[in-house]
Image (spheres, helix red, strand yellow):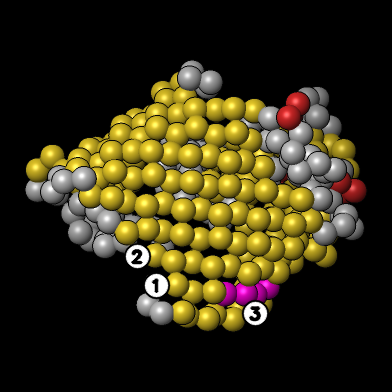
Amino acid sequence: MLCYYICRRTLNKTLYVIGTNWSIASGFKYHKNMFSPEVADGYKFKGNNSNYFGYIRSESITTDRTNFPTRGHEFITEAGIIFNRKAKLEIYNNEGQSIDTSELIDGKPEFYRFMVNFTEYHSLSEKMVFLYNLQAGLTMNSQGFIFDKFYLGGVEKLSEKQNVFVGLNEGQITTTSLTSALVGIQYNIAGNLFVTGKINTAIYNYSTLTNLYDEEMLKWINGFSLGLGYNLGVLPMEFTAMYSPEIGTVYSHVKIGFLF
């Protein structure tokens, strides 16, 4: 069960548009997480933490439509620094007693975050589309607190630190680093009805506080999905079943409408 509140405020943003499909932006954000008492399965916190985030981002989108595209690409990359970190935290042990753990974050040095995500669609025929995705994320000088990490899992992107990975639920794995690849086939059965099969693989958790790559910490995961969708224009719908052999559980996901 996920139970916390996130406050994000953009303090300053500068946007440069280059051509019709490419932009570069820079700015500062203020982030504050408030949670009580259960943040996620196995983690029970009470309190809050906050920080500032300075970043530079580049983005390019050339897909022919938002849902079930047949050609084009989606690209985004971002690099930033997280600083002025503050926290007032209590963690609960198995007996229900709280322990002040603010020092895990409060006043800690700044850390750096980098991510890149690229997806491309190629029409193989009038009805069939080949797609692939490459993504990576890395935190440097991070103490490994759960809210400093990337979230791995899910069929669609719901938050800025989430990295989509079929076979897992949203945020099922948290990690300081990841590299993944996905391939898929989208087929137009008839009219606006589509079926999409995807396979992805990833390595993750290979960075530590002092090393960008530690082979002993590296983990590997794979996932598969099969989705049936209907492009209803203003109200697209898609049902997806997915599985990861490393997890051993079949999950389902239902998407209705657009993300804003």
Q: Is residue 2 left or right of residue 147?
A: left
User: What is the spatial separation of the Cα atoms under label 2 and label 3, in whole angstroms?
Assistant: 27 Å
Point 45% across, 29% down: residue? 223
Amino acid type of disc 2?
Answer: Thr
Determine which residue is flagged by label 3.
12
Q: Is residue 47 left or right of residue 24?
A: right
Res. 51 visible in picture? no
Point 64% across, 79% down: residue? 12
Q: Can you tell which of label 3 and label 1 is closer to the viewer?
A: 1
Amino acid type of disc 1?
Answer: Asn
| Residue 27 belongs to magenta span | yes
In front of the other: 4 or 227: 227
Q: Are marks 1 and 2 in contact (CB under 8 Å)?
A: yes
Point 82% across, 65% down: residue? 84
User: What is the spatial separation of the Cα atoms under label 1 and label 2, in whole angstroms?
Assistant: 6 Å
The label on residue 235 is none
N-terminal of the two: label 2 or label 3? 3
Q: Is residue 133 left or right of residue 161?
A: left
- Spot occupied by residue 189 in the image (x, y as percentages of width and height): 13, 39
The magenta-colored residue range is: 25-30
The label on residue 21 is 1
Amino acid type of disc 3?
Answer: Asn
Q: For residue 144, what is the image quadrant?
A: top right
